[in-house]
Amino acid sequence: MNLTDLRDELTTHADDLGTATDLRAGVAAKVMQTKRRRAVAVGAGATLAVAALAVGVVTSLGRPSPTVPAGTPSSTAPMIGADGLPYRAVPDAHGDIIKDGLRLRAHSADSLLAGGAIGNVGQRSLDVDWNPTTTKISLTVECYAPTTSPTAARDLMVRARVGAMEGYVSMSCSATAPGGDLPVGGLELGPSGQGSADVTVGTPATLHIDLVDRQNRPVSRPGVRLVAAVYELGPQTEVRDAAQQVVGLVPDALEHQGYTYRLLALTAGPLTDVARRKVELEAPSSGPYLVTYGTVGTGSLRANPGYYTLDGLTGQASQVQEGGRETVPQSAGRGQWLTVQLGEGSPNSTGTAYIATYVLAP
């Protein structure tokens, strides 16, 4: 997807905000964007962070078909995926949840599956129970409606609530049929780095999701499949603002196409420095790598939010709305400078931009 297509998609979803007239008055809402769909957090303290790993967390941890085999089947050279990065199939493991050719991974990089469920086609709600060992969790909340058009799918929402959380998280459905490995997390509840206030270590908790329409009314659709899972996050590194206050976290490890990538470098700076091209990080000098960038501490969604790009990428461009995060695979580094830029919209006078690079683990 190019920047124009992405901008149009985000604009379409942003327009949807005006239609949800029955949401609780006076309750703060924060919207983050992914390439595929809109995610909304509603309710006191229900801040939502969408982590799009690789080409979005929603797609990066699946089983993309390799297109260029590096060497013969007996060769030790790795297979190469469509994005030019190493690819290998991940065998089924103890703790995986497998159903109808779909799989929720028991672990990915440092994230561990605490509980999950793959619904039956036509099932309109799911419950996932787990016993928390940490409040730092990431949710997989998926809704697939392949029997409908993309427009009709966007009119369906999957609504999620953890425990007694005030409000809920809602995401529009996808018209694309699921296949292979399902997303690993992607929705992180609570202020970045602080964990979810609706989860208590040692106290059993429940993630509940159900299918609703744009007016927040429960509905049923014969061809829809829901997926829900809770992943407990592994070690993370702090993102600090200009005053050296912790404003966010990035994971110490990411998985992409069956390989683990470890954090190499991280930089951050105020959004006021973006226009002066001062938020920058040197890319690896060689080899495949992942680069994550985004903004934190930007407050509630504004009428004309900023959309940020990353200069220095090779291949397809990337764009993320303020408050969001994107991870982009790069087939080879050349020591170039990666720089956060304001692509569209108005600049935010608050908040912090950051860039992190990850390289293949030994």
Image (cartoon, rainbow, N blue to C red):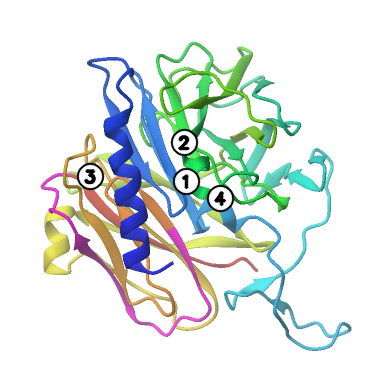
The amino acid marked with disc number 4 is: Val
Residue at which label 1 appears = 151
Q: CA distance from mark 2 to mark 1?
A: 7 Å
Q: Position of residue 47 (x, y in %)?
A: 36, 29
Give 185 or 337, whichever is nearer the viewer.
185
Q: Which mark is residue 45?
A: none
What's the CA distance linking mark 4 and mark 2? 20 Å
Q: Residue furthest bottom?
A: 71
Crowdedness near tag 3: few (<14), some (14–19) or many (≥20) residues, C-alpha within 10 Å:
few
* Amino acid type of the residue that numbered disc 1 sits on in the rendered structure: Thr
Can residue 193 be seen in this snapshot? no
Real-space CA distance between mark 1 and mark 3, rounded to the nearest whole angstrom: 44 Å
As helix, strand or loop, the secondary structure at mark 3 comes to loop
On residue 58, the disc is 4
The first of marks 3 and 2 along the sequence is 2
Disc 1 on helix, strand or loop? Answer: helix
Q: Which residue is tagged 3?
A: 244
Residue at the far right in the pictured view: 74
